[in-house]
Each structure stands twice: as C-alpha cells, then as structure tokens.
Amino acid sequence: MAAVSLRLGDLVWGKLGRYPPWPGKIVNPPKDLKKPRGKKCFFVKFFGTEDHAWIKVEQLKPYHPHKEEMIKINKGKRFQQAVDAVEEFLRKTKGKDQASSHNSNEEKNRRNSSEERGKQSAGEEKRNASLSEGKLKKGTGEGKKRVSSVSSERGSKSPLKRAQDQSPRKRGRPPKDEKDLTIPESSTVKRVMTGTVAGFKWPPSVSEPVKDSDPHFHHFLLSQTEKMVVSGQTACFYPAVCYQAITKKLKVCEEETGSTSIQAADSTAVNGSITPTDKKIGFLGLGLMGSGIVSNLLKMGHTVTVWNRTAEKCDLFIQEGARLGRTPAEVVSTCDITFACVSDPKAAKDLVLGPSGVLQGIRPGKCYVDMSTVDADTVTELAQVIVSRGGRFLEAPVSGNQQLSNDGMLVILAAGDRGLYEDCSSCFQAMGKTSFFLGEVGNAAKMMLIVNMVQGSFMATIAEGLTLAQVTGQSQQTLLDILNQGQLASIFLDQKCQNILQGNFKPDFYLKYIQKDLRLAIALGDSVNHPTPMAAAANEVYKRAKALDQSDNDMSAVYRAYIH
C-alpha cells in the first residue's frame, strides 16, 4: 500500500477511538499544546464542531478520495452538517483562489503593459537621441555627443523603473485581508489527492466501533500522575487552553513513557442515535436522579432490570419495558453491569452490605457502578469488598439535577476500573452529555464533593444577595436582570432566582442533599488540614433552613433561612 502524504492545511477524515470518521482539517495546534510522544500524529480541527484533537497518522484519510465512502456509512444529521461545512469551506477557498488568480492576472497585465510602454518610450528616446546626436555632430562635435548619449541611456531606463515602482506588490500575492496568516493553503483544495488509497484500511480498534452515537456526548479521560510538582511549582495543565470555547474539550493522552498529559481533544459522538451495549444492565435506586437515568437507558434500547426500596416506583419503568428485580442481590446476579444511585454514605453501604445486598450477588466478572455522591472513604470501602469477591468496581457520581437527569444531560465523574468505564460507554451516553475518567477509586468522590461545595456555596450567596436587595429597598427582579447580563449569567443562576421570586421550591435538587455534600466537603478539607470557611458558613445557613422544615424542598429554599 502506497503511503498517503499529508501536510498542514489538508482536509482529512479523522477517526478518534471507537467513534466513526469525521471531516476535519490539519491545523497548527495552540502554542502551549504539546505534541504527544510516540507515533506520528497531526493536530486536526473538526468541521461542524469546535472540537480538535491529536490524531495518529494511521487514523487519517485524505478527504476527497474517501468522501463518497464516508457519506454512505454515516447518515447522522450532525455528520451531514459537518460535510456541508467542508463544502462551504471549499467554495469560499475556491472563490479566494479565483480572486487571487484574477488579481494576479491583472497585475501581470499591468506589469506587461508598463514594460511595453517602457520599451516603446525607450525606443522613441533612442531614435530622438540618434537624431540629436547627428545634429550635434554637425554643430558641436564629439564632446556634446557623449553628453547626449548618456542622457539617452538614462531616459531609456527611467520609464521601466517607474513602471516597476508603481507595482503595488509582487506578482500573484493576495491582499493581506485574504491571506491566511496561520495555516498555509490546503493542498487538498488545490488538487485531488493522488496515489493508491483504495486499499487504505482503518487499523482495528481495541473495542467494537460505535456506529451510531449521541451528538452531545463527550469523554474526558483524566487520570492522576504520581508527580504533580515540576521545578518547585504545582504542575498546570495547559492553562492557555482554558480560554478556548467551552466545547473545546480535554483528554488525557497516555504517552509511551507511562506519564500522562492533558491534550485538547474531540471525542464527540458523531451520529444522532446510540448503539446500546448488548450487556444486561441493572439499576438500583429510583429517586430524582435515578428515575431520569433509567428512563433514558430504556429509551436508548438498553435491557434494564430495576429495583427500588419502595417497589411502587418500579411500576412506571416496568410499563416502559424494564424488568423487575426482587432484591439488589438478584439484580446483580442476573445482570452484567449494575448501577446504583442512592442518597448518602449510609444508604450506599446498606445497599451493598445489607441483607440480600449487592455483595451477595457479586461473582467473578460481575460489575458494579456506584453513582451515589458519597465520601472517598465510603467508596473505597465498597470497592474493596466488591473486588474481593472477584467483581469489578467503578464509582461514577453525577453532577446535575432532576431536569438534567430527565434530559440525559448529566455530567458523569468516574474513577476505578478503566475497562469497566469503557464498557459503560453507551450507558453514559444515554444518561449524560459528558463523562470524565479521573483515575483511581476515591478521586471521583472527592471531585464531586468539591463541585457540590462550590454549587451549594453559590446558591447560599444568591439567596443572601436577593434578601439584602429586598431589605435595602432594591428590586430583586432588577438584581436578577443585572446578574443575567453580567459574568455570572448562567442557567443555574436564572432558574434558582426564578424559584425564589416565584416562591416555587419544588425539589430539583433536595436541600438536605446539598447540605450533606457541604458537610462531607468540609470533612474532606479537614482530612488534609485545608480551610473551607466559605463552605462552613454556607453549611450553617443550610442547617438553619433544615431546621425550618426545608429539607425536602429544592436547595433554593435556603432563601427562607434569611427571611425568618
């Protein structure tokens, strides 16, 4: 097979992991984004998204020769939009090329015309000089002839020199506003790639490729390096990338040296549907979050067996096609992967260690994924007992609320068994928009508590600001309008303020659970002797709200702690 030569600016089909090929362009990477070591790769920006990635050369194909082939095997709406974006890019580039060529031709014509005029003028002056010379011979002799000859030579050069000086720029150079200052003109635009490419095959991936995937889903594969201090300073992961658009994601590329580095990457799922895993899925716990998760798993074609402490909650899902498990042990023993989402550390432990619990159903190869928000010690203990029975364990707490759970737009933080994380891919795509893999067990629990600590503290500050506005005679609605026009603008801010202004505290995220997470986050800080005074202050306000019977209301009901 003849090698396919690629270079900066080329249009390509890039294949990332288990996802289908996607059209992109080889571009210059950001200055602070290092190239992964090992095999040769190019930095590719994908059309139709704001995503980009380092792609190994063997995972790239030239765009034009494989266009028809790719269009036949990919039918998703997002994919077609990406192809349309490529064609639009080609049209614009062709227009620029034609404009540049037209300008070049005009420039050439002007130059030739000037040169011709210069030659004609030089010829005229030569003839005039000859006549003058003849007259001078008769009138004044040889001395003046030499002066006239020198004058004639100067005159013959002057018009050509003027024509050259009048040229605005070198032949064929496009105006500055038409020139791409970052990326050279794509060779793919100028020509159709030649060479033997018909036999080009994608290298087989470790796992089966996903033919149809959710267009909103992104993987973040983040693991912890053993050494986090470089040259006496805390290591920073490419800070220059942080200002990129939020859709520009991060991925860890594991280098051949064994170390890890974060690279901007696209692992956007590229079609409008999901190919569900053929593994049997179990789910334990049908609360605010669990209900939405199970519903989306079923919608996307997964085979799901459910269990809940209050059995009546299972009825709706049985009607939607779920199977009923009588006990957690039965669900685990009959399913390949069992997920659980319960309220707190005690509930998580009881579910695993209690009568007819998860542990009794664990056998070698059985997989357990705990999606509860608990502390690192609890999740580590659960992982140890599961693995001791030959099971596989993954923690995967979720960031979001009931609405995001129903919409399948949760953010999943995972840690533990990396292979199990990969096996859960279609499930995570069904329930969330993004997943992160954070390394060893306990990391996801810590990160989740930190996220909820920030969220809970922010909510308390919002409530404090609204009550202060009220008691000082300011309009709460105007305050919200101002905040929505500033840097703090967010869906979370707007929704929670609207809850308060309307007096609607129907739970989207229980107040008692955000207070529990604040408490656990403060304990996490204590365990490493790190101060958390802001979280501690917010925690006291939530405790007061609980004392006012707000536990089962939404977290925004913390507002009532300020007005009583």
Image (cartoon, rainbow, N blue to C red):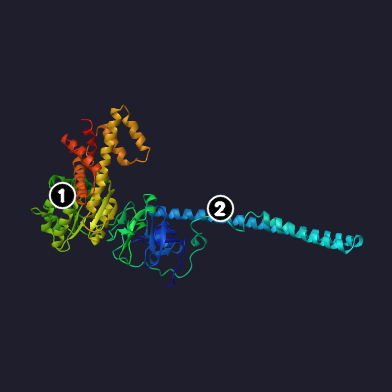
Is residue 501 visible in the rendered structure shown here? Answer: no
Taking the view exactly as shown, the residue that stands out farthest to the top is: 473
Taking the view exactly as shown, the residue that stands out farthest to the bottom is: 1
Nearer to me, 158 or 13: 158
Taking the view exactly as shown, the residue that stands out farthest to the right is: 138
Instruction: Give the vertical position of 50 relative to 256 (above or below).
Output: above
Q: Secondary structure at mark 1?
A: helix
Q: Residue 215 at x, y = what percent?
A: 34, 52
Nearer to me, 413 or 453: 453
For the residues bearing labels 1 and 2, Cβ distance under 8 angstroms: no
Q: Secondary structure at mark 2?
A: helix
Nearer to me, 408 or 75: 408
Instruction: Give the vertical position of 256 relative to 32 (above or below).
Output: below
Q: Which residue is mark 1?
A: 345
In the rendered structure, which amino acid carries the disc numbered 1?
Pro
Q: Which residue is mark 2?
A: 176
Q: Residue 312 at x, y = what percent?
A: 13, 45
- The circle drawn on residue 375 is none
In which quadrant of the rendered image does the C terminus lie? top left
Q: Residue 90 at x, y = what percent?
A: 49, 56
Q: Quadrant of residue 379?
A: bottom left
In which quadrant of the rendered image does the N terminus lie? bottom left
